[in-house]
Amino acid sequence: MRVSAGIIAFFGLVALAPASARAHPMLDRAVVAYEEADFERALQTFDMAAANADLSVEELLQLFEMRALVHHALGDDASMRADLERLLAVRASYELGRLAPPSVRSAFEEARAAAAEAGSVELRIEETRIEGELWVVAKVLRVPESLVDHTTLQCSVDNNARTVSRTSQGTATSVKLDGAHNGCAATARTRQGGVLYRSSIDGTIASAPPISRRRVEAPRHERRDEGEVKKKKKWPWIVAASALVVVGGVTAGVVISQRSKGNDSPETGAVTVNW
């Protein structure tokens, strides 16, 4: 009864395990073939999974480690070291599992030291001019062969209103831009879409308020000198006073002229009084 209860509990835990914790079926079959010492079948299954299966990043790590063990069992040292280098390229801090023999562990530490000296994998984004046109290029450097499935590059343009994007098979891609950009980001991914590497660069457009803000901004007035303002406020009164002086002068001239005419030639019929 206790044995039956233990078996039931075991299968219950397996059934409740999250799907993400389970490996791809092809990987499971390859691992079983390795444990049965059927190394040729294990290698064939691992190669088929690497070429055709949509594997996550964690599944790729498992594939590279187990295939390295298969290569070691078959005496293929070069292929074993190639898979160990792929492990370190994906995750520099990776540690081998319990199935790895001492000779594989020693080769793994040698590969780790060589990778540290050569430099880690880099996803570089650069701007270049081709026949006078601006291109942005993304390329994965120092990456083992057949590790990256596709590379995607996206650039924000038109004041972040539009995105120019391109995805290419392999380790490099590029986009052509009509002018400056607001920033670009690139990713190198597995066949399934898992991100292996990512990188970004800042935009070449100087920061400026959006066009909509410029339309609603209140106009700016320059500060004027207080004396100048007072002078400009006084000028209507000066003009008005000048006009009054001119009108008064004309009126006085007319009166004087009329008086002069009266003294020189008195009108007929006028009465003269003598005291």
Image (cartoon, rainbow, N blue to C red):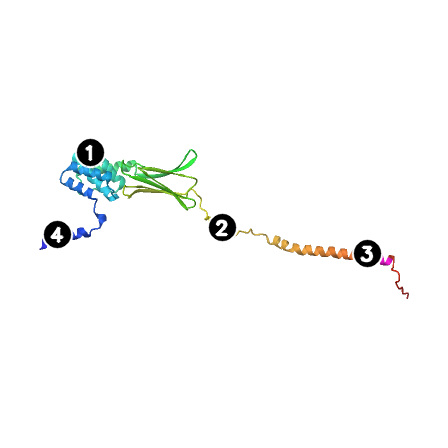
Q: Which mark is residue 77?
A: 1
Q: Nearer the viewer, mark 4 or mark 1?
A: 4
Mark 3 belongs to which amino acid? Ser
Q: Nearer the viewer, mark 1 or mark 3?
A: 3
User: Residue placed at 85% from the left, 58% from the top?
Assistant: 262
Q: Which residue is under mark 2?
A: 215
Toward the viewer: 81 or 260?
260
- How crowded pointer 2 is (Cα within 10 Å; few <14, some 14-19, many 20+) is rated as few
- How crowded pointer 1 is (Cα within 10 Å; few <14, some 14-19, many 20+) is rated as some
Q: Which residue is under mark 4?
A: 7
Above or below, 3 against 59 in this view is below
Query: How many angstroms separate mark 4 from mark 1 (CA)?
Result: 41 Å
Query: How many angstroms separate mark 2 from mark 4 (CA)?
Result: 73 Å
Mark 2 belongs to which amino acid? Arg
- How crowded pointer 3 is (Cα within 10 Å; few <14, some 14-19, many 20+) is rated as few
Q: Where in the figure is residue 89, as x and y percent of width and height?
A: 27, 39
Classify the position of the N terminus by image quarter.
bottom left
Q: Sequence order check: which comes first, mark 2 or mark 3? A: 2
Q: Sequence order check: which comes first, mark 2 or mark 4? A: 4
Mark 1 belongs to which amino acid? Asp
Res 82 seen here: yes
Classify the position of the C terminus by image quarter.
bottom right
